Amino acid sequence: MKKFIYICIALILASCGSNKTASLSTDVPKEVNISNVAVQPILSNLNNVNKGNYKEGELLVKFKLGVVTTSSFKIHQAVGASVIKSFSVVPNLEHVKLPEGLSVKDAIIKYKNDPNVEYAEPNYILHISETIPNDTDFGQQWDLRNTGQFANGTPGADIKAPEAWDITKGSSSIIVAVIDTGIDYNHSDLVGNIWTNSGEIPNNGIDDDGNGYIDDWRGWNFVSSDNNPMDDNGHGTHVAGIIGAVGNNGTGIAGLMWNVKLMALKFLNSDGEGTIADAIGAIQYAVAKGAKIINASFGGSAYSNTLYDAINSANSAGILFMAAAGNGGGLFCDSGIGNNNDLSPCYPASYNLPNIISVAATDQNDNRATFSNFGLNSVHVAAPGVYILSTVQTSLTPTGYQFMSGTSMSAPHVSGLAGLLYSYYTSFTPSQIRATILRYVDVLPTLNGWIQTGGRINAYKAVSSLLTPTNLNATAASPSNISISWTDNATGEDGYKIERKTGSGSYNQMTTSAANTTSYADSGLTDGTTYTYRVRAYNTIPADSFYSNEASTATLLNPPTGLTATAASTSQVNLAWTDNSQTEEGYKIERKPQGGTSYTQIASVGPNVTTYTDSSGLSPSATYSYRVMAFNTAAGNSSYSNEASVTTLSPPGQSSSNGGGGCSVARQGTPVETVDLGLMLIPLVFIVIKKWKR
């Protein structure tokens, strides 16, 4: 009897138990990295590079940190390459020679297929960054590129024109008025850059544009009051060539501006003399016909209110006035011995007007020329003016070129530089152009303390000072942070202005960064929101570069947290979570059955919803896992919430799949728990009866 009772107890305990309740998974899934990674394949860059720009048969290969020499040797061996040398400045970088017949492109593919290789790239050939024209006499133009080729000159004592030409070579929309002895408008090195009056029909005897000058289709001669501004001295043609002789045309010289329109306005006669009245007439013509720059390589010691007023009117019209400081004292500022213009002024250079730049002369060794006037207050900057090769009419010399010296040759260098600046910085005002020329100079001990800036012009410094930033990129770092980066191309910026707009709104400057910076971290942003950025360089002149490209990205969405799942019945599960996003358009709900390999989206709900009831296709006593993510149009999907698992309830009369069933004998309508308790008490009743009988 005892054995029978014990067997019953064992069977009951083995087959009957309590149901397990639905459980919440507290495991947090591994973080999903959904940030975009910008990949720039080396091969795509290689396709855009000419073969002559890299060394055939060679590669530079960098192995990942920790790769041992034996491993790298085997990789080289597999490619058939041999190591030429290694570098300590870049750890794990090796310069390799490729086997015959293996192209650089194919070798890169082979190396990149090995997981131990960080990168493999061509052995690019580097070039000096300057544009050298093919003009036959350019080698004699020490003022633009000084290699020491002239009179034991100092290499580098020049205005760095070739480097500036890498950025701009001028523009035919820029008109420079040469108020001088005229221009040989038929000169082969000038004819392509001579200004013509579009409002005038040549030689029809009519003042077509109504400006008071008949047939002024190529300028005007104020000496003889006719339409022929041909040079009969050589001075004006020489000045014009310095400013704008056609560059890279295979002949003669290169002007500082390869592309320009030179307006010929003759007011000086064949002896180089002219009147104030004619000078004013020429200035008036230049103003009326849209000149941006006037070159004034003339002067005298007499102060003229009329000339002052004319130049002031040109200032009101937005015209810069480049004036020679003079070549000494005396009536015409030409004694040949440098004069202090602060004490003995030379006009028009010494007029105190904001559009004038007074220019001194330097030689091939960056010394102030002995004949050049100076003045700490009245002379602003220097430019080459000794033995300058430029154009002259062939009636003076059969070659059409000649060396000349004087501040008359210095001023057109500054006029040409102003034209280059106008060509690139098309939104700059005259005052910004002037300030740029004066700020970005090469300060020299031979000039410091003698003239206002203490320096000689540097075309490259000026033109490159506020080059536009490029390659602006924006990357979402988190729901509240965006990182932006750009390429710093400017050489003289004081910093960068960073602007931002939200959605389709307007830009606002949010901050500035220091000079030479190339990145910024923007914080405190709203999640799931699109922000657009643009950047520009600035200086304290004040002047700004053009804007960079725009870069847009959306901050990441804050994911939902605290997901719970509760079984409500045999075919229903209730979900709840915490809404952390401010901008979600809804939530996507995914489900996976026990033993399943992947989640399936089962539903989506609207914004600000934090619950969902799943009643689609659930089975009794079955376990399911859930996860939720926010979404919107701007940012896409957030990362997932935590996972939550649950088991649906068992149907009446059956046990749960998680135990607690299999032996219930309850009648319909009788709670299973009550019957189970009764069954468990049967052995105890037997024992009590047994003892009672004894």
Image: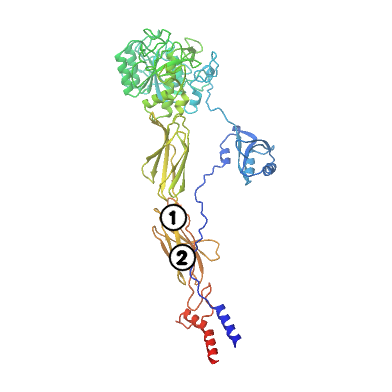
Q: Position of residue 247 (x, y in %)?
A: 49, 22
Decide if residue 337 is in sight here: yes
Image quarter (top left, top right, bottom left or bottom right) of the N terminus: bottom right
Q: Position of residue 681 (x, y in %)?
A: 51, 83
Q: Nearer the viewer, residue 366 or 143?
A: 366
Mark 2 crowd level (few <14, some 14–19, many ≥20, 10 Å Cα): many
Q: Quadrant of residue 606?
A: bottom left
Kind of residue at badge 1: Phe
Element under label 2?
Answer: strand
Q: Quadrant of residue 269?
A: top left
Which scheme is used to colour this image of the protein? rainbow
* Mark 2, residue position: 565
Looking at this rendering, what residue extends furthest in the bottom direction? 693
Mark 1 crowd level (few <14, some 14–19, many ≥20, 10 Å Cα): many
* Mark 1, residue position: 631
As drawn, 64 above or below 295: below
Instruction: State the CA–CA distance, disc 2 to disc 1.
Output: 21 Å
Q: Nearer the viewer, residue 542 or 28?
A: 28
Position of 281 compared to 147: left or right? left
Q: Residue at x 52, y 46 (%)?
A: 37
